[in-house]
Image (cartoon, helix red, strand yellow):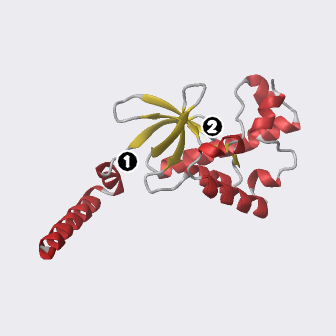
Amino acid sequence: MPFTLLSKSLKTITVVLLILSLFGCEAISKLFGETTHSVKKVSDGDTMKVIDANGTEIDVRFACVDAPEVPHSNKEKKSRKAVDKSQFKWGVQAQQRVQELVKQGGDRVQLTTTDIDQYGRSVSEVRLPDGTFIQQVLVQEGLAQVYRQYLKDCPSAEIVEAAEADAKKRRVGLWRDDKYVSAWEWRSLKK
């Protein structure tokens, strides 16, 4: 009996290795129920639009973090206020970094949905097919902040908190900008 179990285990391992060598990590993810989504558009540093396997578009809001805003109107683009310039500078950099990461992942991401927000967006932890956690990268590089108001719903809270502590300590990205105010504060100033 033990030999039979060993034989079956070796066959399973062989099949998994064969699938991995022929089709890559994404095939293994699908085998175990994890699917990737095609990225249609990176809207800013913490939102994107993806397409699922059925062709359905899904608006995604990154869980755990809040990235600086990008300008949405000509008035915002032309603003001379230091607080706006700072917000948009970091917002554009965050958006560009997400675009780079998505490209690195072959324009595909894996979502771990934690909630649906008031706008109907899927609030999700977003990872590349290789496991790179996009929110962690943004926070570590000083291009986003931990969104403590919603951290209780974040499965990877410890990861993003550690990344932020490191970014603050190293004074990278927005942590070295004296004119920067958090995105949630900036939005409240606009109301």
The relative height of residue 50 versus residue 24 in the rendered view (above or below) is above
* Residue identifier under label 2: 44
Q: Nearer the viewer, mark 2 or mark 1?
A: 1
Identify which residue is drawn at 31% across, 55% down: 28
| Left or right: where 59 falls relative to 33 | right
Quadrant showing the C terminus = top right
Which quadrant would the N terminus be assigned to in this image? bottom left
Dot placed on the residue nearer the N-terminal end, 2 or 1: 1
Name the spot of residue 35 as percent of width and height, x first: 37, 44
Horizontally, residue 113 falls left or right of residue 35, namely: right
The residue to which callout 1 is attached is: 34
Mark 2 closeness class: few <14, some 14–19, many ≥20 residues within 10 Å: many
Decide which of 22, 35 is in the foreground and name it. 35
Residue 16 lies, with reference to residue 67, above or below; the image says below
Q: Under tag 1, what secondary structure?
A: loop
Report if residue 21 is visible in the image: yes
